[in-house]
């Protein structure tokens, strides 16, 4: 009987360090936002009910968009070293994320970082945009096929005006 009591106690003794260590090594979107808040002494605003909004967008787009995370930092006054910011984001996102765009203005007050990461049939996108005194951090999962179809609806098709005139003459 005493042995059966030891099993839950041993389980708890092993689980507590794992939970504590996992919480301290926060990564991904939340890790990036927390690191920015800590490093630059700012507070990120998160959109309330974003989980519900993400679920609705997933249904509305037939699975085209899901897993949205958004944080906005207003009144961002700190000087930002682009290299340091890039390293911080890469460290927190992890090696599976690949940076596809890094744009930094000469003055340094505008920074844009875009990362991608395959998520099965979906593609994870992470965007950090610092523009003046506002920073936006967004992570979303998109279906590339669905996105391509949606963008294709807005493509402009080139019409050769000489062929149009010739067709008009032939129909007369």
Image (cartoon, rainbow, N blue to C red):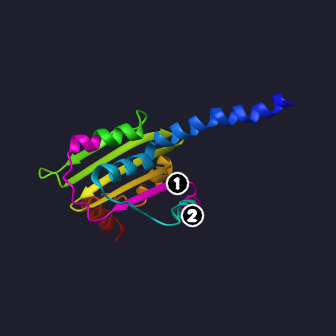
Instruction: Give SS at disc 2.
Output: helix
Q: Quadrant of residue 88?
A: top left
Residue at 38% x, 51% y is: 33
Residue highlighted by disc 1: 64
Residue 3 image offset from top left, x and y in percent: 82, 28
Q: Please tell me whether residue 137 belongs to the stretch shown in magenta.
A: no
Image coordinates for residue 49, horizontal then vertical, percent: 53, 66
Viewer-proximal residue, 171 or 112?
112
Q: Left or right: where does residue 15 sit relative to residue 125?
A: right
Disc ID at residue 39: none
**Quadrant position of the C terminus in the picture:** bottom left
Q: Is residue 111 left or right of residue 17?
A: left
Mark 1: few/some/many CA within 10 Å (<14, 14-19, 20+): some
Residue at image point 59% right, 60% down: 59
List x then y, in percent, for residue 67: 52, 53
The front one of 49 and 45 is: 45
Marks 2 and 1: CB-CB under 8 Å? no
Rounded to the nearest whole Å, what is the CA distance between mark 2 and mark 1? 16 Å
Q: Which mark is residue 52?
A: 2
Q: Which residues are magenta?
A: 57-86
* Residue at position x 21%, y 50% in the image: 80
In primary-sequence order, the first of circles 2 and 1 is: 2
On the rendered image, what quadrant is the N terminus found in?
top right
Task: Report the residue that reaches farthest toward the top.
Answer: 3
């Amino acid at each position: 009987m005493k042995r059966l009591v030891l099993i839950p106690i041993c389980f708890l003794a092993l689980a507590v360090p794992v939970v504590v260590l996992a919480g301290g090594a926060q990564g991904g979107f939340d890790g990036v936002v927390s690191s920015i808040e800590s490093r630059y002494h700012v507070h990120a605003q998160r959109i309330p009910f974003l989980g519900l909004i993400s679920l609705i967008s997933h249904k509305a787009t037939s699975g085209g968009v899901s897993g949205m995370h958004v944080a906005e930092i207003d009144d961002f006054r700190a000087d930002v070293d682009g290299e340091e910011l890039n390293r911080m984001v890469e460290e927190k996102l992890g090696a599976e994320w690949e940076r596809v765009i890094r744009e930094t203005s000469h003055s340094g007050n505008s920074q844009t970082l875009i990362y991608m990461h395959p998520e099965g049939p979906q593609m994870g996108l992470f965007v950090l945009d610092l523009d003046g005194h506002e920073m936006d951090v967004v992570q979303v999962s998109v279906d590339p096929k669905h996105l391509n179809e949606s963008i294709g609806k807005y493509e402009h098709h080139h019409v050769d005006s000489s062929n149009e005139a010739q067709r008009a003459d032939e129909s007369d």
